[in-house]
Image (tube, grey):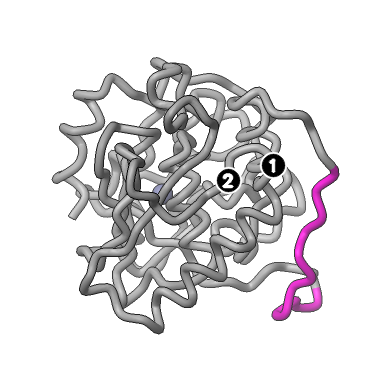
Amino acid sequence: MLARFVLAFVLVGLAAAQGVLNENLRWRINGVRRMAYSFDRNYPQQARQTVMRAVARWNQVLGDCLPLQPRQANDRDYINVFNGQGCFSMIGRVGRAQDLSLSLSNCVYQGTVIHEFLHAAGLIHTQKRPDRDNYITMNWGNIAQSWQSQFTKETRGIGKYTEYDIYSIMHYPYRHPSWSIGGRPGFTSKIPNVNYNRIGTGNDFAESDVVAIRKMYNCPMRKFNAIVNHNNNRNGAKSGRPIACSNV
Ligand SMILES: [Zn+2]
């Protein structure tokens, strides 16, 4: 599920810490800063509704900067949302149709949809940033071997747009049934008083995600209002679903 796209990523010359530097990987369609998407024709209506609600949230937050719009007839480059094996996306604009998988079995949640579109916009996983060792300690022995590449640092072709944010929607959860051995944590935080249940489980952008996109795309900064969370627990933690994305 993950090995399949590794080659493609290497071929487009990306690598990542936070966001792609290569201007060609940033979205512009017919000279306009925007992203286009369409659904695979087999993608069911109910899942489309969830995706479109997440897209509406995207446009509420980033519509003035990098709107995400249904593909129009003359949009050569676009994102094709389909029911693939897991949740994954290419990083940045690859050119022409590019697949973004939102499996019906575990990816159709607002947080996951936003996460995958942020990959498509050019962001990489936070725990792959080259400065991550200042913030987390890796527990390699708790991570299934086939997933360890998801935790290797990326050093080439990327820009740093914000400080490390362990609550970024692009950060992995500290454990996940897909990859943590015995449910043990794949990393521990060096940041004091971190709420582990909040890491990688958000159902909305973190402010740092919005700032990163605005900087990458040279958009003006705007005040960011987090959504009122429907599932707040006592610690104010977002309790979305742990994101299981297998990119890069
Ligand atoms: Zn991801």
Q: Residue at x 29, y 54 (%)?
A: 80
Q: Which residues are magenta?
A: 223-234
* Extreme residue in the bottom direction: 46
Q: Is residue 179 visible?
A: no
Asked if ligand 1 lies within 8 A of label 1, the reply is no
Image location (x, y in percent) of residue 179: 31, 59
Image location (x, y in percent) of residue 114: 52, 56
Is 179 inside the magenta-drawn segment? no
Q: Residue at x 19, y 24 (%)?
A: 11
Q: Nearer the viewer, residue 46 or 192?
A: 46
Task: Tell me: 16 left or right of 198.
Answer: left
Query: Residue 190 occupies which quadrant of the picture?
Result: top right
Image location (x, y in percent) of residue 166: 63, 45
- Mark 2–mark 1 distance (CA, rounded to whole Å): 7 Å
Task: Tell me: 126 left or right of 64.
Answer: left
Q: Residue at x 58, y 45 (%)?
A: 67
Q: Verify CB contact (< 8 Å) between mark 2 and mark 1.
A: yes
Q: Nearer the viewer, residue 82 or 247?
A: 82
Image location (x, y in percent) of residue 170: 52, 47
Query: Residue 182 occupies which quadrant of the picture?
Result: bottom left
Q: Nearer the viewer, residue 123 or 243?
A: 123
Count neighbours of disc 2 (C-alpha within 10 A) and say few if under 14, some if 14 to 19, many if 20 or more.
some
Q: Residue beneath label 1, please?
A: 64
- In this rendering, the answer to whether 32 lies above or below 238 is above
Q: Look at the image and tell me in which quarter the C terminus lies.
A: top left
Where residue 10 is drawn, which disc sits there?
none
* Extreme residue in the right direction: 223
Q: Residue at x 55, y 65 (%)?
A: 54
Q: Which residue type carries mark 2? A: Pro
- In this rendering, the answer to whether 61 lies above or below 109 is above
Where residue 67 is drawn, which disc sits there?
2
Q: Which residue type carries mark 1? A: Asp
